[in-house]
Structure formats: C-alpha cells, structure tokens
Amino acid sequence: MRFFPPLPANAGVRHILTLNPEEGRALVAFYSAVLRNARPLEPVAQA
C-alpha cells in the first residue's frame, strides 16, 4: 500500500520533496550544511 497515492510505487526522496518544495529546499540546505562540510563529524558532548 502506498502512503502517497499520487506518487509512483517506486517513488524516492526526489518525488516526495516535490510535494512540499519549501520543505524540500530546507532539507537540501540542511544536508549540504551538515554532510558536505569539510570538517569531520564530531560527537556532541553529553550534559
């Protein structure tokens, strides 16, 4: 069963992001800022 009937059965992230372009741009910006940064990921200190 598909969760988004207007999308094809094999829909990927690209298809889902077209449902809400503004949120899609925010997700791509987040991805670019976090995963494409030159520095390696560092663990967050526990308080």
Image: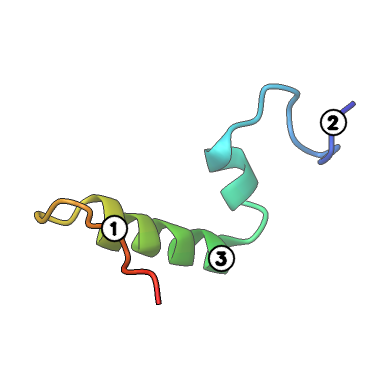
Residue position marked by numbered label 1 in the rendering: 43
Say which residue appears at 22% left-offset and 57% top-offset: 42
The foreground one among 3 and 37 is 37
Q: Is residue 20 left or right of residue 1?
A: left
Q: In the drawing, what numbered circle is on residue 2?
A: 2
Secondary structure at numbered mark 1: loop
Q: Mark 3 packing: few (<14 Cα in 10 Å), some, or many (20+)?
A: few
Side of 17 where 6 appears, left or right: right
Marked residue nearer the N-terminal end (1 or 3): 3
Vertical comparison of 25 with 6: above or below: below
In the rendered view of the protein, which quadrant contains the C terminus?
bottom left
Under tag 3, what secondary structure? helix
Residue type at tag 3: Glu
- The residue type indicated by label 2 comes to Arg
Tell me the CA gap for discs 1 and 2: 36 Å
For label 1, the crowd category at 10 Å Cα-Cα, with few meaning under 14, some 14 to 19 and many 20 or more, is: few
In the depicted structure, whether residue 15 falls above or below residue 29:
above
